[in-house]
Image (cartoon, rainbow, N blue to C red):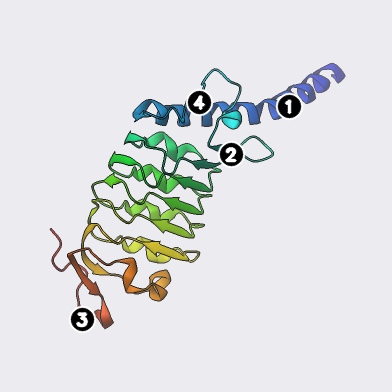
Amino acid sequence: MEKSKEGSVLFALLVAALLPTALSNSEGDSLYALRRSLTDPSNVLQSWDPTLVNPCTWFHVTCDSQNRVIRVDLGNARLSGSLVPELGDLQHLQYLELYKNNLTGHIPSEFGKLKSLVSLDLYHNNFTGSIPRSLGKISNLAFLRLNSNHLTGRIPRELTSITTLKAVDMSNNDLCGTIPVTGSFSHLQAKSFENNPRLNGPELEGFVPYEMSCH
């Protein structure tokens, strides 16, 4: 009986010790999926070696004390290609900085699973499609900068429920409909939405319907 107990304790300790490594390997897989989808003329991703124990030694990746990925800093890196849904599996990611590249395609709806995300900076790229409604699930999000892309469709009202939002920039896109003015959007300035020719302005006291002019 004692041996059985000792065995159970040792097994539990072994599992606990291996969990951070397993998590890091999983996060490495997610990041390597991104690398495979990108063209990298400046070789900024050269250190992203999937055979390493975890991605914490990779350039432009920051981990916490438990080897969990908390930052990806790839702004102004001359990258092209598209984002991958696997990035949504980075459960501890706080900062995703991909601004000033030549990224195309849609913003993955899986980003709504990034529950720890504080900053999402995708500005000055060539993203198309709509802003995913799922981003409204990122309850810790403070900075959302999507300006200077080719995004279309409505501004998701789900975003207004993120109480932590401090800065939003959706200017210089092709968004349509109206600008929400409730919740976290109540304090945003007009310049956050300028240069969207099909955007009709704020929903002032309900006079401008949300469904207006958005095809």
Q: Amino acid at mark 2?
A: Thr
Say the numbered circle drawn on residue 12: 1
Sequence-first disc among 4 and 1? 1
Say the numbered circle drawn on residue 62: 2
Where disc 4 sits, the SS reads: loop
Q: Which residue is mark 4?
A: 48
Q: Residue at x 69, y 39 (%)?
A: 65
- Residue 67: x %, y % from top left: 64, 34
Q: Amino acid at mark 3?
A: Phe
Sequence-first disc among 3 and 4? 4
**Quick one: 211 or 186, which is closer to the camera?**
186
Mark 2 and mark 1: Cα distance apart in space:
28 Å
Please say if the residues under marks 4 and 1 sit with CB atoms less than 8 Å apart.
no
Sequence-first disc among 4 and 2? 4
Mark 4 and mark 2: Cα distance apart in space:
13 Å
**Quick one: 122 or 2, which is closer to the camera?**
122
- Hey, which quadrant is residue 156 in on the image? bottom left
Please say if the residues under marks 3 and 4 sit with CB atoms less than 8 Å apart.
no
Say the numbered circle drawn on residue 64: none
Q: Residue at x 23, y 48 (%)?
A: 129
Mark 4 and mark 1: Cα distance apart in space:
31 Å
Q: Is residue 60 left or right of residue 86?
A: right
Foreground mark, 3 or 4?
4
Please say if the residues under marks 4 and 2 sit with CB atoms less than 8 Å apart.
no
Q: Amino acid at mark 1?
A: Ala
Say the numbered circle drawn on residue 207: 3
- Hey, which quadrant is residue 167 in on the image? bottom left
Mark 2 and mark 3: Cα distance apart in space:
47 Å
